[in-house]
Image: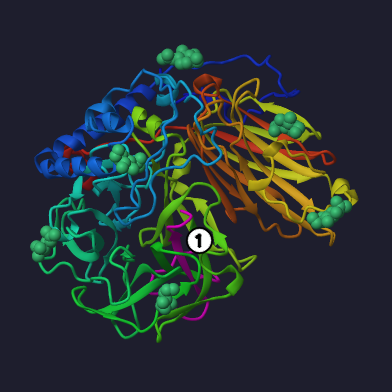
Amino acid sequence: MVDTLPFLPSSSKNVILPVSYSPLHDGTQPDRRRRPTKGLVAVVCGLCMVALMAAIIGSKIDRQQVLRHHHHDRDITNGTLSSSSSSSSSSKTTLRETPATTTEKPLSRGVSAGVSEKTNRLVGAGGGNSPAFPWNNSMLSWQRTAFHFQPEKNWMNGPLFYKGWYHFFYQYNPNGAVWGDIVWGHAVSRDLIHWLHLPLAMVADQWYDENGVWSGSATILPDDTIVMLYTGSTNESVQVQNLAYPVDPSDPLLIKWEKYSGNPVLVPPPGIHKKDFRDPTTAWLTSEGKWRIMVGSKINKTGISLVYDTLDFKSYELLDGVFHGVPGTGMWECVDFYPVSEVSNEGLDTAANGLGVRHVVKASLDDDRHDYYAIGTYDEKNGKWLPDNHKIDVGIGIRYDYGIFYASKSFYDQNKARRILWGWISESDSELADMKKGWASLQGIPRTVVLDKKTGTNLLQWPVEEVESLRLTSSEFKDVQVKPGSVVSLDVGTATQLDIVAEFEVDKKALEETAKANYTEFSCSTSSGAAQRGALGPFGLLVLADNILSEQTPVYFYIVKGSDGNLKTFFCTDQSRSSVANDVNKQIYGSFVPVLKDEKLSVRILVDHSLVESFAQGGRTCITSRVYPTRAIYGAARIFTFNNATEATVTTSLKIWQMNSAFIRPFHPDQKKQHSS
Ligand SMILES: *[C@@H]1O[C@H](CO)[C@@H](O)[C@H](O)[C@H]1NC(C)=O
Ligand SMILES: *[C@@H]1O[C@H](CO)[C@@H](O)[C@H](O)[C@H]1NC(C)=O
Ligand SMILES: *[C@@H]1O[C@H](CO)[C@@H](O)[C@H](O)[C@H]1NC(C)=O
Ligand SMILES: *[C@@H]1O[C@H](CO)[C@@H](O)[C@H](O)[C@H]1NC(C)=O
Ligand SMILES: *[C@@H]1O[C@H](CO)[C@@H](O)[C@H](O)[C@H]1NC(C)=O
Ligand SMILES: *[C@@H]1O[C@H](CO)[C@@H](O)[C@H](O)[C@H]1NC(C)=O
């Protein structure tokens, strides 16, 4: 019933598959529906995992249950949501058959508790009072990803590499597929791809984190010990910073955590509202030998990061002023700060400074739920940071990702001398569907992040190389000419788990001869997506499309020639026709992408069921999209290349790999022996 893994014959390696040119709405492609293989196992494991985790924490859960009901009284009682969500773990193991008959108005979650809105508002969906789409089991099961880290519900804390294992601590609701009752889940991996779920690392069992063990960051000290700082929401909903450390530092799995008896170590300073003080960063050393951290906050509408110095992580000195702040950007969540090298593609330890080093500040804006970064200069002495360009400052300039991507955090991976950025991807279907699926949200593929040496003004984000270990067979298509207004089927079989690398060359004559256009105002999000035909775009790929294109998700470039004669390239993902369901987000995402002279246009796309991650021009502009097809699923999912420009012919070369599923399952004690020997 679940098709996650098309095991193709290995003989298809390097074979150039036939390319068929088909007009729009050509329904003649054979439907090579694939047999279910191990997908079912994967899904069942995922659900077992949840049950297992619930079992592990069973003894600790009682007070949480009480809290949860309390939350329901306050947040969830209205509407039909309460009955679904209150059945907690049992609702996860059985997907419900009954189609909903009305569209639920999503209730707000998170805001009253003092964090950002966690409910997806379905911007652009049918909405209103139209009937909800009749989702059935097989449609919902298909949405679960196969090679992305996915607990039941999570968002980001600081990952780290310790004694041979990558550790990931994440925000987790053990009681349901909606935000609430947040504790710390914990998983470990050797390669950032295959994961073992461990018992919960920390639960809300103290007055200073009674309302939630929220985001935090780990710091590895020079003597190889670890300290963890995290935000707790107290019994009085005050946001405070707490200290925790592993009980047994010699345990590579870091299973047991102890909270410092003197918690909290930081409370909101004067002038900072009690609900505006959260998400401490990883600490870095100053040249004076002190540890420095940042905590996100705001004053009125100005988003800020406060900066503290400490010697022992127990007592702190608040530095004067703010590390950085930008008026109008609102609360800064999950602030991040790190160096990038101007000369090397190696990552740098957070403390690195000096010649050839620039510094990135990132904030997750509570107000619009996007991650913004800016590149600038760190003034260590005064504890400040200045952007290179005030016009593209934090929160008003560049985003890591122009789709759905939030609360990311970076860490320095000393194992491979690289900086890794990891973001949380929420759902963009309805909350009711999430509860029927029994899970909500996941992690994107971890990305390496480096300074773009060619432009000097942006970062490059790229899937970690380990994801390539999942590549199975590949199909290559060379110099496929795609004429204006055409769609070309790329026969790779089932197209639900793919790694795609594609290059596009636009006919030079068309570029030169195209009249200067008046749409300097072009923007992906206000355009009509891939259906908006211009002289030089859109062209790109249609992923998760069925044969008759009744569902399709175009990922594409759109070039415009400004009145000054210069070309400007945009990179977009159009979700407007990704699903016939009405109750999913249908926004068109995207942004400008820098393209230098003599560069070809290039894109890498990872497709993993309902998750599509796209990286243009080596990762200058990235778009993560959640799409929920109902027809282009299982064996019916196809991939096409298209060109909807009116004047330019586009020549495309692609390599497309089928992707294996990752092993993401509960940890078994035997595995420790196996892996540590
Ligand atoms: C929930 O119901 C209560 C009582 O009926 C009402 O006061 C409150 O406004 C409702 N909340 C929402 C979010 O609809
Ligand atoms: C779900 O609906 C689709 C389309 O109507 C249908 O093909 C499929 O068999 C249904 N699956 C189940 C489990 O009902
Ligand atoms: C919260 O906990 C603190 C420390 O135990 C206690 O002093 C305070 O009275 C508690 N507040 C409430 C509202 O229970
Ligand atoms: C915040 O806004 C209030 C009311 O407008 C104003 O009185 C106050 O000075 C502002 N605070 C700062 C730090 O700007
Ligand atoms: C170009 O755009 C401007 C401003 O939007 C508009 O006033 C003008 O009429 C447009 N010119 C053409 C040729 O469409
Ligand atoms: C190309 O544009 C036409 C006209 O707007 C539209 O009907 C068609 O769906 C577009 N093609 C794709 C692949 O989006």
Image quadrant in which you'd find residue 548: top right
Q: Is residue 611 above or below residue 10?
A: below
Query: Left or right: 150 with respect to 184?
Result: right
Is residue 123 one of those drawn in magenta? no
Query: Left or right: 4 with respect to 374?
Result: left
Magenta region, main secondary structure: loop
Q: Nearer the viewer, residue 599 or 567?
A: 567
Residue 410: x percent and y percent? Answer: 40, 60
In the picture of the structure, the residue carrying the numbered disc 1 is 372
Instruction: Classify mark 1 as within 8 Å of ligand 4 or not, answering yes or no.
Output: no
Q: Nearer the viewer, residue 9 or 408?
A: 408
Q: Nearer the viewer, residue 89 or 185?
A: 89
**Residue 152 visible here:** no
How many numbered badges does the structure rendering display? 1
Residue 66: x percent and y percent? Answer: 14, 42
Q: Is residue 135 above or below residue 338?
A: above
Residue 97: x percent and y percent? Answer: 36, 18
The image quadrant in which ligand 6 is located: top right
Residue displayed at 61% across by 68% down = 456
Is residue 362 one of those drawn in magenta? yes
Residue displayed at 33% across by 23% down = 95
Residue displayed at 13% across by 57% down = 206
Quarter of the image that includes the N terminus: top left
Q: Nearer the viewer, residue 406 or 496?
A: 406
Start and end of the magenta stretch?
341-369
Query: Left or right: 193 with respect to 571?
Result: left
